[in-house]
Amino acid sequence: MKHCFEIDGIDYPLWLVRCKDGYRLRLDNGVIALLSFSHQGEGRGTLTIAGEREPVRFVIDGETIHLHMRGLTRSLRYRDPMRALASASREANHLMARAPIPGIVVSITISPEQSVSAGTPLMTIESMKLETTIRAPRDGVVSRIHFKEGESFERDALLVSLLEEGI
Amino acid sequence: MKQLPFDTVLIANRGEIAVRIIKTLRKLGLRSAIVYHEVDAGTLAVSMADIAIAISGRTPIAAYLDIAQIIAATHKARAGALHPGYGFLSENVEFAREVMKAGITFVGPAPESIALMGDKIRARNFVQRNGFPVVPSAVEEDDPGTFLSRARAVGAPLLVKPSAGGGGKGMRIVRDLDSLEDAIAQARSEAQRYFGDGRLYVERYVERPRHLEVQVLGDTFGHVVHLFERECSVQRRFQKIIEETPSPSLSSEMRQRLCNAAVGIARAADYRNAGTVEFIFDGVDFYFLEMNTRLQVEHAVTEMITGIDLVAEQIYAAAGFRLGFAQSDIVQKGHAIEVRLCAEAPERGYAPTTGRILMLDYPEGDGVRIDSGILEGQRVTTAFDPLLAKIIVHSPTRIETAQKACRAIRELVLLGCETNASFLARMLADDGFLRGQVHTGYLDENPSLAEGDSGSALPAFLAAAALLTRPVRDSADAVPELHAALGSWRN
């Protein structure tokens, strides 16, 4: 069965197959054999990959696996096939301005039910000591402002929701 | 050990620097007290302190800036002295005065020194008057009506700076004089918001400069010594990323001149405590930039090569003791490099990152020092600056130090919050850095250093993730071995 992991917004489909002495992993661009993983407890383990033993440190947090290996740290999100589909269709039906970075709302320049055109400044946020203007991604009407001035938000937080005009 | 006139020191700070100060207080046999906002209740510094007193504020930062609450807490803890750390109120002259008025020893220089050096324009004029080099500039308040034309006359490229500023806030580079007016308006708005003071000045922007600074230490008897230089040229947007000592860009003659200038400036200012005189260096000449009247984030590299505990010296100086050594007693031994581990993503324009620290394991070894204020389980938010820990490494030579630092940063395990670790490792292995060819614009000129290495070792990460994910492993195990073998045969 095909599974999928997401790293930094990119999906990596894969297929794990059991074989005599361990597993094989099929990726889009090839097959890795022979694989096995032994646990040493407390988030430590050893990945054996094509005869090489790699010490691994890991934490599993819900659908996200945080890994440290070969001097690198990476977080991979397991994409449940059903749920991945549902969230994609939800996003498509809404117009919204999301936070490119975590920060604090400095000022809000629009009010609910105001018509805006693509590029209209919606709010000023501050992050990394610098101010950034959040602009309307498309024409529409402001339906909801999700944060007040002075409030802080995380990356990707929904800042302002818009409705298409005439709907 | 010297007998100090107080037995408890309150730390008006948080995070790694609070932990760092507590360690020295313990070594000196002093009790430590700390103030904390509730978001910091579970942090290492609060658990290590002998006394911890909660303070509140509209925002967490506001709590650490609340002079009245901090002084009340100092009395409550019966602390005879207060250490401000860096940032927050450490260079606030009103705070230093209030602390002293309350009968508490302020671990820092005299308020007059803070006032002088805190006003960048006064400081610059003072340094110039005393015969030390400064960069050409125009100061708004000299004559606000002609500021714009005087700024133009300095010539591009220019740097627009808030008079009351620091830490890179509100600074802008102007290369095209046509955009000068806009840059001034933006810088003024930011300066007004950050410092409540919209006054500005501009100075000639020295292209590709190196950032050098000299650690000085003074006592109340007028003795001032230097503890040599630090080079902090690896910066982005005026924030230091890697600091080292000795500087690879100085000849011994130039080092002597620079350190002497720093001591001269500190002496002229009757400076009493630890301070740092910052310069820019274009390879030929150096110019005074500013003086920081507090302990610096990067003080640890100086401690590594001199063996002097700067926090202890600050406390002795504040207590009115004579410096315990002369200039000739201070020698540079080996090389030290510090890297700042931050909750930020260099590949996304150094955007801050957030999360919960799920696993934390620091590298160990000879000559490896970790100054950290974080614990497993702790949340990383954007409430404070993104510094998580400092990794400081000491070795006989620069190249060995860079290699050891690179190994240490790759061994460091921090899971649950994205950090700049792999960027730091790349920087430490960068050819230009290893050859000592960096300047403060180096990262802007070499954006690929920040780009990340998302492609490397990807199959191994996917393999580990697949084997650690139940549904993936279960569906593989569900297929009988023979079929699995056939399946992969057929393909």
Image: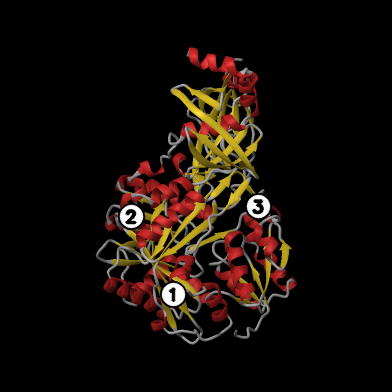
- The amino acid on which the numbered mark 3 sits, given as a three-letter code, is Thr
- Density class for disc 3 (Cα within 10 Å; few <14, some 14-19, many ≥20) is some
- In what element is the residue under mark 3? loop
- The quarter of the rendered structure image containing the N terminus of chain B is bottom right
Name the residue nearer the viewer: B257 or A95.
B257
Residue extending farthest left: B284
Q: Chain of mark 3?
A: B
Specify the subunit that label 1 lies on. B
Residue that numbered label 1 is attached to = B216
Q: Name the spot of residue B151 as percent of width and height, x first.
A: 32, 56
Q: CA distance from mark 2 to mark 1?
A: 27 Å
Q: Is label 2 in a helix, a strand or a loop? A: helix
At horizontal 48% and vertical 47% (from top left) the residue drawn is B420
Q: Is residue B302 above or below residue B359?
A: below
Residue that appears at 47% across and 31% down: B459
Labelled disc at residue B370: none
Q: Amino acid at mark 1?
A: Val
Name the image quarter holding residue A111. Answer: top right
Q: Between tags 2 and 3, which lies in front?
A: 2
Determine whether label 1 and label 3 are within 8 Å by CB.
no
- Rendering quarter of residue B200: bottom left
Q: Name the N-terminal-most of marks 2 and 3.
A: 3
- Left of B28 or right of it: where is B209? left
Q: Is residue B32 left or right of residue A4?
A: right
Q: Which residue is mark 3?
A: B59
Residue B490: where, in percent of width, then height?
A: 49, 12
Q: Outermost residue toward the top? A: B490
Question: Eyeballing the image, is B99 above or below B356?
Answer: below
Which residue does the numbered mark 2 point to in the structure image?
A: B434
